[in-house]
Each structure stands twice: as C-alpha cells, then as structure tokens.
Amino acid sequence: MNKILSEELVREQLKQVIDPELFVNIVDLGLIYVVDLQASTTEEGKTDILIEMTMTSPMCPAGPQLVANSRQAAESLEGVGNVEIKVVMDPPWTQDMMTEDARDQLGIF
C-alpha cells in the first residue's frame, strides 16, 4: 500500500540525509525549516514539494551535498513532482534547534 504523501513522510525521508561532518541527520539537527506540499501545476496527479532548509554555518562546505541529497531523498518518494529546495540563513541555525536525539548523539547537554 502506498503511503500518503505528507509533511511527516517527507521529513522521515529527509532523515536519510546525514550531515557528513556531524554524522547526524539533517531533520534532527534542525536544518529543515519548511516542508510545503502543493498539487503539481505541471504533472497531473503529482505533488510538488518546497523545502526551506539552512546550514549549520553560512560557509558550510557540505552545503551543496546536503541540498543534492535532500532533493534526491524527496524525489524518491512516490507521487512527487517538482522538488524545490531553498537554502535560507534566516533565522540563523543554533544548537537549540536540534532534537534531544541529536544532542545525545553529539554529547551536548
């Protein structure tokens, strides 16, 4: 049975994307700000996804890799049309945006 495409499903899928420096997934790190699903204007029966994400720092060397991996993860879901990823730096990322799991993994208390 197909899973219904939802923000939760997209976020679960994005947990496959691991920050290569911190070895924690980008969702638990708090890098994903917005996941917006809308009916595709170009592909009948498909859903377009807009993802707004940030980086741990403006000059994050893994930025292009994280964006590419995020796009690939979202596009692999069934029923997905166009995936747009916007990298935003506002609000700036802080450690407060991480989940408890991410803090535990990194030893931050």
Image: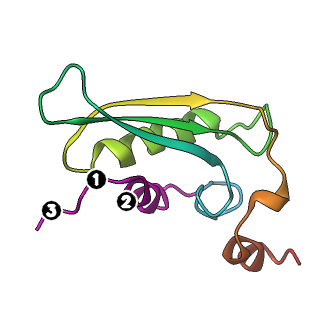
Q: Which residue is depicted at the point 16% across and 25% down? A: 43
Of residue 102 and residue 1, the one placed in the foreground of this image is 1
In the displayed structure, would residue 41 be above or below residue 7?
A: above
Q: Secondary structure at mark 1?
A: loop
Give the image location of residue 35, x and y in percent. Answer: 49, 44
Cα–Cα gap, marks 1 and 3: 9 Å
What amino acid is labelled 3 in the image? Answer: Asn
How would you rate the neighbour count of disc 1 (Cα within 10 Å): few for under 14, some for 14-19, many for 20 or more? some
- Can you tell which quarter of the image residue 28 is in? bottom right
Q: Is residue 3 magenta?
A: yes
Q: Read off the residue under disc 3.
A: 2
Q: CA distance from mark 1 to mark 2?
A: 6 Å
Residue 6: x, y in percent?
35, 54
Count of marks placed on residues: 3
Q: Which residue is mark 2?
A: 9
Dividing the image into 4 quarters, which one contains the C terminus?
Answer: bottom right
Left/right placement of residue 25 relative to residue 37 reads right
